[in-house]
Amino acid sequence: MRVLRQIHARLLTQSMPIASFSFGLCKIIGFCALSSHGDIDYARRLFSQIRSPNIFCWNSMIRGYSQSQTPSKEPVILFRKMVKRGYPNPNTYTMAFVLKACSIVSAMEEGQQVHASVLKSGFGSSPFVETALVNFYAKCEDIVLARKVFDEITDKNLVAWSTMISGYPKIGLVNEALSLFRDMQKAGVVPDEVTMVSVISACAASGALDTERAKEVFDAMPVKDTKAWSSMIVGLAIHGLAEDALEEFSRMEKAKVEPNHVTFIGVLSVCAHSGLVSEGRRYWSSMLEFGMIPSMELYGCMVDLLCRASLDEDGEIVAQRVLELEPHYAENYILLSNLYASHSEWEMMSQVRKEMKDGGIKAVPGCSSIELDGLVHEFVMGDWSHPEANEIRDILRDISKRVHAVGHEPGISDVLHNMVDEEKENSLFEHSERLAIAYGLLKTKEPTVIRIVKNLRVCGDCHEVTKIISAEYRR
């Protein structure tokens, strides 16, 4: 930047035509806004000095803010200013950059307004814009609109396929992701490493591949970037394979591949679930040394880690900090609510729940899935709408008898609600993972392996009961 400032000073002292001066400033703005060695604030000051910035300058600023370590709606604000001025007209790159910015901050309303501008300007058939629209809706978790845009693309390229495939697993629709991957293969489109990372993630989440097969696919990849390593680590973490996940992270470090937020979410979550407190603290320190700004998910992992270690005061401090940083994220309220409930502080728990309700914030329900004959079946706690619900109840009753027969005492402390013990025991009976396991026992015979995947953490009682089921039913 020191050299660039010298160049800028030279421009100011030289006598030259306005057009040449503006051209030079635009080039400096492009570097400052987009380079990892640049300075977006300096770029903005230069940008404000140009009377009529050209499209290159506008695009550089919009894209530069999108790449910022502290995402904001500034790209959208700039885009609106440009449209209001009427010159220059946005091009396909402008639209794509703004849509990417909207996807980063989940600005659904603003993104839909940009989509309307796309249709009005006639840029809807641009592959660059089409892919940006699919990515925008997928990142905002409106998978229906993402698929609608995807289906309307006449000539689907590799990027479009990969973007759509990666969108499904993020909201738990792993079966749809794998189905679309098969469609991609039928269409003769050859997947690249990015596509395979998404497929591995979907397989890991659904249990469609055992871990050894997933490792084989991963190890066969000629180039393993941060996304590939992160997908493998998170996949192992999902299956509770702490040792394997941390071993892969060690391999990643040795390969000199820099981890990202997703990598550390996998590492810290597996430390939390395995009670590896000192290791979790060490990885947290390592993450900060990389210069990463902790995300809400990472703070959540640390709250979980500290609470499990009975470091409750630290846990409450971190949980409160998370709420301050992101007051609209349901999981943050759940973490704090569960912390209070674990100490029977029901009034404090009720207050947190009331804040959620008043703010219109809804928690994501626990969901467990099981794959049978290539189809993923999903179960939600207490949901008896399944067509074979009566048969599932019968299996659960048999499980309950066998579990009690071996002397297991229900871990009602895992039920973080203010209710009597009998109600708590009945509540454990209807946890989504037990419904999924019961369905697996119903539809398969021993010694078939039953693999269950849950979108949230498995409670301690279900963990113990699952081990008993494995022994009793020889699964």
Image (cartoon, rainbow, N blue to C red):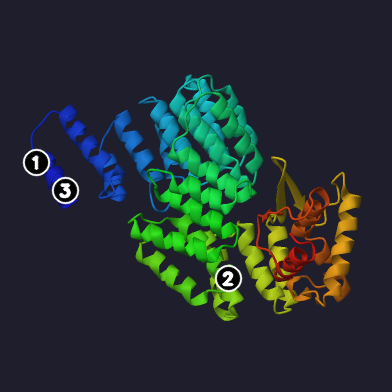
Task: Give the left or right position of residue 393, taking residue 110 as reference.
Answer: right
Q: Which residue is mark 2?
A: 274
Q: Quadrant of the C terminus?
A: bottom right
Q: Which residue is mark 1?
A: 13
Q: Amino acid at mark 3?
A: Arg
Q: Residues within 10 Å of mark 3 (few under 14, many from 20)?
A: few
Image location of residue 439, percent across then percent down = 80, 52
Image location of residue 423, percent across then percent down = 87, 70
Kindly report the distance in space between the C-alpha atoms of the residues bearing marks 3 and 1: 13 Å
Image location of residue 198, percent across then percent down = 52, 42
Task: Give the left or right position of residue 169, taking residue 385 as reference.
Answer: left
Closest to the camera, between mark 2 and mark 1, is 2
In-front residue for pair 190/317: 190
Q: Is residue 18 above or below residue 174?
A: above
- Mark 1: which secondary structure? helix
Q: Which residue is mark 3?
A: 5
Question: Mark 3 or mark 1: which comes first in sequence?
Answer: 3
Name the residue located 36 percent from the left edge and 26 percent from the top edge: 87
Q: Amino acid at mark 1?
A: Thr
- Mark 3: which secondary structure? helix
> Residue 374 falls in which quadrant of the image?
top right
Question: Mark 2 or mark 3: which comes first in sequence?
Answer: 3
Task: Give the left or right position of residue 442, taking residue 215 as reference.
Answer: right
Q: Is residue 416 visible?
A: no
In-front residue for pair 227/22: 227
Give the number of the disc on residue 353.
none
Closest to the camera, between mark 3 and mark 1, is 3
Q: Amino acid at mark 2?
A: Ser
Name the residue located 32 percent from the left edge and 37 percent from the top edge: 60
